[in-house]
Image (tube, grey):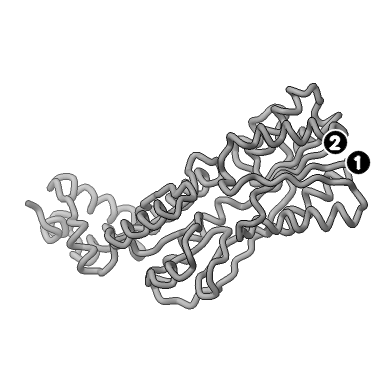
Amino acid sequence: MATINDVAAMAGVSVTTVSRVLNNRGYISEATRRKVYGAMEALHYQPNEIARSLLKKQSNLIGLIVPNVSHPFFGELASHVEFHAHRSGFKVLLCNSHLDPVKERDYIEMMKRNRVDGIIMGSHTLEVEEYRNLRHPIVTVDRLIDESIPYISADNYRGGELAAQHLVDRGCRKIAHICGNLDLQLLANRRTDAFLETVRRHGVQHVVVQTDMNVFDQNQYEEKLEAVLREHPDIDGVFATSDIIAAFAVKICRRLGKEIPRDVRIVGYDDVNAASWLHPALTTIRQPIGEIGRLAVELILKQLDEELTVREHILSVELVERETT
């Protein structure tokens, strides 16, 4: 079986250079990289990942826990996390919690057994104490769980303000706001705070509809939206706290014979790729999903290098106006 020394000899480089290529560390010219990979292929060399992780006390694995990767926001986030992790020489272990605390705890234990170097949390159902005891670098996305754990969030308050103000400016006089469950301690609830303050400031009638505790269960969206639009037939604006909910609002309005945007104007949230594919294309609040993924990986790597990290990372949002308003 070929060794790293054999690869270095065939490629005409040092063992250190081969190691840097394998670990994607430091500057390596493309010509040198090709020589090393060519030697590895010719020798059928396979690096011993277990031995490398024990030697470095690092697995080059990052754990990512999300509520459900089939949700467009989390699917796109996972894609960006994987992209930036791979560029830094890391692989991603992806888990869906489905907001089940037992499942989330099992996944965290599995990550500990697999010696992940850090965990990016897009889901939070466990008690804070369980995260304090992990002794792994952690970054949370849109979750504030402890004063010592860095988190990333888009500016939820500004997003809610932009959405509400846009509907008011478009002449809406009765707006339905469809949001997650406000009993959950989510930073996304700041969108609702801003919505309420904005419509009250303008004296605009409004109705707030919450999901149940499983905020990502899409089966409830259709029922709740149809109920509120039938109960309040004079609703002429909808602000939904995700693009998926907004897409259901478009569907229900069509079912009830309401034309968009003539009868009802709709604003979503996230600006996932599908928002521009819908017909009519969805007006929405754009979160910088790619930047959230990049920054999450960067913060894990900084903690691994024992660099001091800022705890709070609030990213800008913007209104993207399309055909639904």
Q: In this view, does 6 lie above or below 215?
A: below
Nearer to us of marks 2 and 1 is 2
**Rendered image quadrant of residue 120:** bottom left
**In what element is the residue under mark 1?**
loop
Is 19 on the left-hand or right-hand side of 301? left
Q: Residue 171 carries which label?
A: 1
Residue at 44 percent of width and 49 percent of height: 97
Q: Which amino acid does label 2 sit on?
A: Asp
Q: Where is residue 56 in the image (x, y as percent from the top left)?
A: 25, 69
Q: Where is residue 184 in the image (x, y as percent from the top left)?
A: 61, 57
Q: Is residue 163 above or below residue 146?
A: above
Name the outermost residue toward the left: 1
Q: In this view, does 174 lie above or below 55?
A: above
Q: Which residue is labeled 2 in the image? A: 236
Label 2, label 1: how far apart the Cα atoms are: 9 Å
Tag 2 near tag 1, CB within 8 Å: yes
